[in-house]
Image (cartoon, rainbow, N blue to C red):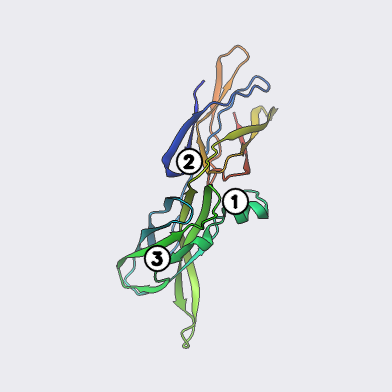
């Protein structure tokens, strides 16, 4: 049985083997992470930034913005929490939201036609920051004039994800949850769940092999990719058909 490779922030890798037998089916859980597709006249690089910091310390990084047009593009930078599209209590969101740790050197500026500009971003971890994963999104909003009084309107926005690991006691642990398998219209439908009981973001990778009672492979099922992986203290429902 192939091990499940799990990626954590700062390229921390580990091998975890989950063996779950329900209705004689063995599962490996995958998910992938992808950056949001640009919908503005600018590009942002990198799409994801990773920060390893000790409590009370400050780090800086640069983000490259490129104006792909032949016109002036006004930009406004704002920082918000990371929407991981997963259920979480307000308490958990407050613990892992690092948006208030970030400042952008000059949040309002104008990009000249075809200009490439480096933007400095500073992150200061509080002295009492909880060890483990914390998250934020650095948005770059493209603005457009809407009146002669120079009022502006947000046309579109593109962001860079910030994955922070605060040094300290790091817990990396995924726990399998419920598992069901049934036939629907001649197809085998497998449903399962994973719980991230650790305190860092986890991105499981792998495939879903279905094994017959005899031990012979029946199929390899592709799993639906999750958008952001699995945040701490969160669960993920997964399913596939054969």
Q: Nearer the viewer, residue 49 or 122?
A: 122
Screen quadrant of the C terminus: top right
- Residue at left offset 47%, top offset 54%: 161
In terms of secondary structure, where does tag 1 sit? loop
Of label 1 and label 3, which has the lower sequence position? Answer: 3
In terms of secondary structure, where does tag 3 sit? loop
Q: What's the distance in space between the residues labelled 1 and 3, CA to CA?
A: 26 Å
Image location (x, y in percent) of residue 119: 36, 65
Circle 3 crowding by C-alpha within 10 Å: few under 14, some 14–19, many from 20? some
Residue lying furthest bottom in this view? 149
Look at the picture and state if 7 lies above or below 221: below
Question: Label for residue 99?
Answer: none
In terms of secondary structure, where does tag 2 sit? strand
Q: What's the distance in space between the residues labelled 1 and 2, CA to CA?
A: 18 Å
Of label 1 and label 2, which has the lower sequence position? Answer: 2
Which of the 4 image quadrants contains residue 58?
A: bottom left
Question: Label for residue 41?
Answer: 3
Circle 2 crowding by C-alpha within 10 Å: few under 14, some 14–19, many from 20? some
Circles 1 and 3, Cβ within 8 Å, touching? The answer is no
Q: Which residue corresponds to mark 2?
A: 8
Of label 2 and label 3, which has the lower sequence position? Answer: 2
Residue 36 in view here: no
Image location (x, y in percent) of residue 99: 52, 60
Mark 2 or mark 3, which is nearer to you?
2
Mark 1 or mark 2, which is nearer to you?
2
- Residue at left offset 50%, top offset 61%: 101
Look at the picture and state if 74 lies above or below 209: below
Circle 1 crowding by C-alpha within 10 Å: few under 14, some 14–19, many from 20? few
Q: Which residue corresponds to mark 1?
A: 85
- Residue at left offset 50%, top offset 25%: 3
Q: What's the distance in space between the residues labelled 2 and 3, CA to CA?
A: 32 Å
């Amino acid at each position: 049985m192939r091990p499940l490779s799990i990626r954590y922030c700062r390229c921390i890798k580990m091998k975890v083997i989950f063996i779950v037998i329900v209705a004689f089916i063995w599962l490996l859980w995958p998910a992938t992470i992808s950056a949001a597709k640009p919908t503005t006249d600018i590009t942002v690089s990198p799409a994801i930034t990773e920060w390893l910091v000790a409590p009370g310390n400050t780090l800086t990084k640069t983000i490259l913005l490129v104006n792909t047009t032949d016109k002036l593009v006004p930009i406004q930078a704002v920082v918000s929490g990371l929407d991981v599209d997963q259920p979480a209590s307000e308490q958990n969101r407050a613990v892992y939201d690092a948006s208030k740790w970030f400042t952008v050197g000059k949040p309002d500026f104008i990009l000249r036609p075809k200009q490439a500009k480096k933007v400095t971003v500073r992150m200061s971890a509080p002295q009492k920051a909880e060890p483990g994963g914390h998250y934020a999104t650095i948005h770059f909003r493209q603005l457009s004039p809407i009146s002669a009084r120079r009022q502006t309107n947000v046309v579109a926005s593109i962001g860079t994800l910030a994955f922070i690991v605060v040094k300290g006691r790091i817990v990396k642990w995924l726990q399998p949850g419920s598992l069901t398998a049934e036939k629907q219209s001649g197809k085998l439908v497998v449903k399962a769940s994973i719980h991230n009981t650790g305190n860092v973001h986890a991105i499981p990778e792998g495939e879903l092999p279905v094994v017959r009672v005899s031990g012979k492979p029946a199929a390899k099922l592709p799993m639906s990719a999750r958008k952001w992986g699995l945040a701490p203290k969160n669960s993920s429902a997964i399913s596939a058909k054969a």
